[in-house]
Image: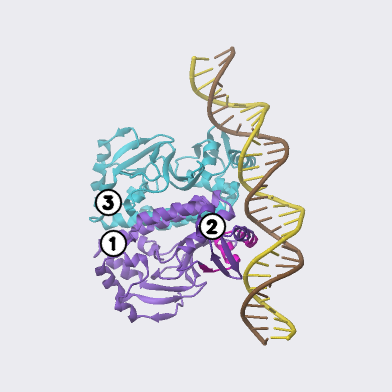
Chain colours: A purple, B cyan, C brown, D yellow
DNA sequence: CTTACTCTGTTCGTTATCGCACATAATAAG
DNA sequence: CTTATTATGTGCGATAACGAACAGAGTAAG
């Protein structure tokens, strides 16, 4: 059970912009039904939202935090499977019916998220077809990200994977600044810390990033995208296609 | 559009055992509603059921064939994302609402499958909650397999991955005999053919498999499982948990 | 039977990544 | 200010997988 600090609860009922694209894409009617049950909770770095095999109760809609879905091997090694930010929600296994997963969800970048009882979300499905449809489309976007992670793990260098990881994280943040150590990135990518150090050094020499002790600044994003493997663009394009987050389509 | 040869169509309406565990797990009522619309089609080796980005029309329920979901990189390299046999269905993006995916579905082991118009399946969801629920649980099983593929690609040796691949394939076949060249396995795993040759040689020397020119026989499955990484067992256990394919639970 | 082709086996140099050891630098704690 | 701790940099040798080249063995086609 996450010990997220509850920041404001009833404030959410004022129905201000949620800052979570998934929620924003829902019709006003659905939003007004859900928001009274939402809690805005703090998501501190490193918090484990759910553990492998654990039955979940809540779904989380990140606003400005990033959550990694990662698998922990028997020997303790890790691999990031997918990453979720203000583009989606955590807790798909509640929606899909499994109630637990084999992976762990960890806060990778601190911030806030809206929290909702999974049962509340599910009970609205029957009332609002749009809600189920959007959730399922999001699940396909997640699947795409997982598939691409598998491909990237097989075929691409640490340098390319670091680029992909930076871009995916950047898209879920407000500025070009990540609070993140190389050690943590290494854990996410499932590689050695030294490998990340070397890759980051190369990116720095290319003028793409600046960094120091737990902070990374992307200074040349176009070049970062250019150095990246195709995996980022594939995930980005498919996510944009699947999720009607653009105001025009709302 | 797949040019599957249509073998028998109306025979399926006789409502004999489907040999697809997913269909078998459905209630008799749902089965009887769906079967009149099912076609039993031949699935020849190498047939592409759908291509990346292509809009699908049909879903497939394999009986004795195996279908790989794989991603094709810009440079032509491949990586298998997941594998589907008599345990599931192909065409989840129809169910999830995306209508196409970034991956390709290829027949990896020839056989037969039931084919159904995707729209027919979807239109039954509203009538039969069980059908949607089972489909979503299957989608979570697929997600588990994809996640584990990503992990395995990152952390495990070709030898271990070959074991995983053999076990996953074996579970979807009737006997211990695979019709499959090392070259094709290499394409699935996204590694060199020589790597598979060496790994297969080692497995042979361990007394686990026999093989010759496109045929593989698993002669010691317990040892195969023992040599395998944890990934197979994780996927197996989670699939069994998610999908009530055991008669007792029907 | 002969030829062509496909599948498998083997070698060899190259490369990316690993595992380990340790040095240096920046921040935090006392 | 000093000391501990954490983050990053660097330099090994070891290893797994790669790319390429080629040999042999089994099968199919003529």
**Observer-nearest of D26 and A27:** A27
For label 3, the SS is helix
Q: Where residue B192 sits: x, y (%)?
A: 58, 41
**Observer-nearest of D18 and B80:** D18
**Residue linked to disc 3:** B122
Q: How crowded is mark 3: few (under 14 residues within 10 Å), some or many (20 or more)?
A: some
Q: Does the magenta stretch include residue B13?
A: no
**Residue linked to disc 2:** A163
Q: Is residue A193 magenta?
A: yes
The mark lying in front, picked from 3 and 2, is 2
Q: Is the magenta stretch mostly helix, strand or loop?
A: helix
A180 relative position to A122: left or right: right
B123 relative position to B25: left or right: left
**Residue B203 in view in this figure:** no
**Residue linked to disc 1:** A250
Earlier sequence position, callout 1 versus callout 2: 2
Distance Cα–Cα, label 3 vs label 2: 39 Å
Q: Where residue A171 sits: x, y (%)?
A: 45, 63
Q: How many badges with numbers are in the image?
A: 3
Distance Cα–Cα, label 1 vs label 3: 24 Å
Vertical position of residue B49 compared to residue C21: above or below: above
Q: Mark 3 lies on which chain?
A: B
Vertical position of residue B210 compared to residue A210: above or below: above
Q: What stretch is highlighted in magenta?
A: A177-197
The residue depicted at 30 percent of the width and 56 percent of the height is B132
Disc 1 and disc 3 in contact, CB within 8 angstroms: no
Q: Where residue B39 sits: x, y (%)?
A: 29, 39
Q: Mark 1 lies on which chain?
A: A
B78 relative position to A123: left or right: right
């Amino acid at each position: 059970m996450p010990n997220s600090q509850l920041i404001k609860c009833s404030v959410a009922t004022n129905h201000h912009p949620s800052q979570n694209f998934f929620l924003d894409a829902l019709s006003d009617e659905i939003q007004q039904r859900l928001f009274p049950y939402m809690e805005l909770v703090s998501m501190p770095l490193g918090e484990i939202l759910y553990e492998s095999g654990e039955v979940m109760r809540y779904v989380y809609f990140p606003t400005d935090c990033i959550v990694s879905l990662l698998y922990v091997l028997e020997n303790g090694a890790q691999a990031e499977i997918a990453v979720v930010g203000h583009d989606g929600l955590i807790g798909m296994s509640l929606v899909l019916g499994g109630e637990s997963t084999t992976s762990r969800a960890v806060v990778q970048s601190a911030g806030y998220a809206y929290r909702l009882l999974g049962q509340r979300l599910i009970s609205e499905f029957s009332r609002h077809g749009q809600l189920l449809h959007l959730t399922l489309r999001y699940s396909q976007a997640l699947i795409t990200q997982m598939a691409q992670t598998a491909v990237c793990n097989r075929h691409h260098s640490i340098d390319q994977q670091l680029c992909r990881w930076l871009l995916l994280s950047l898209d879920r943040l407000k500025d070009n600044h990540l609070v993140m150590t190389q050690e943590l990135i290494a854990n996410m990518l499932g590689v050695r810390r030294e490998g990340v150090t070397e890759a980051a050094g190369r990116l720095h020499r290319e003028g793409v990033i600046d960094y120091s002790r737990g902070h990374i600044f992307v200074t040349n994003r176009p070049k970062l995208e250019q150095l990246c493997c195709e995996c980022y663009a594939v995930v980005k394009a498919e996510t944009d296609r699947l999720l009607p987050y653009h105001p025009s389509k709302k």
